[in-house]
Amino acid sequence: MQLTPPQPPQDHEFEALRRGLNGFNEAVTGPLHRERIASFIKNEGGAVLGGILGEIKWGWLHIEGLWVDDAIRQTGWGARLLSAMEQYAQSQGITNFHLETTSFQALPFYQKQGYEIFGQLPDMPPGHVSYFLKKQER
């Protein structure tokens, strides 16, 4: 056996690692239900002016990203995207939501939507703070 130096993985190596990790996790937690979901704001021509990407896994909805174009920011579209995603998750029996944001992104917005900070990383990215937020609708 040998230990390889840290380097970008080959696809087959990455998949072997993922299969091994998923197998270990599922032996403890049971079969993994994972669903990627997204919602978009599109103009009349079909151009994307915003959207939200998330994943349902282990009974939680993880919001991976939310973006609204500058031209329509501050008009309620972000709240509508987030609400639509939460409502979809709730229709699937999911009432726990979590996400990450940074000090230069949308912390006050998420707090206004009922999310609370449960952790933070200073200087991530350098000069800023990363926040970890959750919302539980029990």
Image (spheres, rainbow, N blue to C red):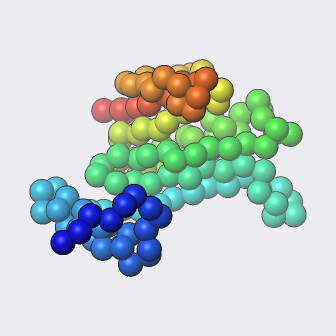
- Residue 135, horizontal then vertical, whole percent: 41, 31
* Image quarter of residue 82: top right
Residue 56 vs residue 74: left or right?
Answer: left
**Would you place residue 103 above or below residue 100 in this image?**
above
Residue 89 vs residue 50: left or right?
Answer: left
Q: Residue at x 43, y 68 (%)?
A: 9
Q: Residue at x 26, y 64 (%)?
A: 3
Q: Residue furthest bottom?
A: 12
Image quarter where the C terminus lies is top left
Q: Residue furthest left?
A: 28
- Residue 94, horizontal then vertical, whole percent: 35, 47
Residue 8 vs residue 50: left or right?
Answer: left
- Residue 80, horizontal then vertical, whole percent: 64, 40
Residue 59 vs residue 72: left or right?
Answer: left
Q: Residue at x 79, y 43 (%)?
A: 69
Between 2 and 91, the residue placed more toward the observer is 2
* Image quarter of residue 134: top left
**Would you place residue 79 above or below residue 85 in this image?**
above
**Would you place residue 108 above or below residue 19 in this image?**
above
Image quarter where the N terminus lies is bottom left
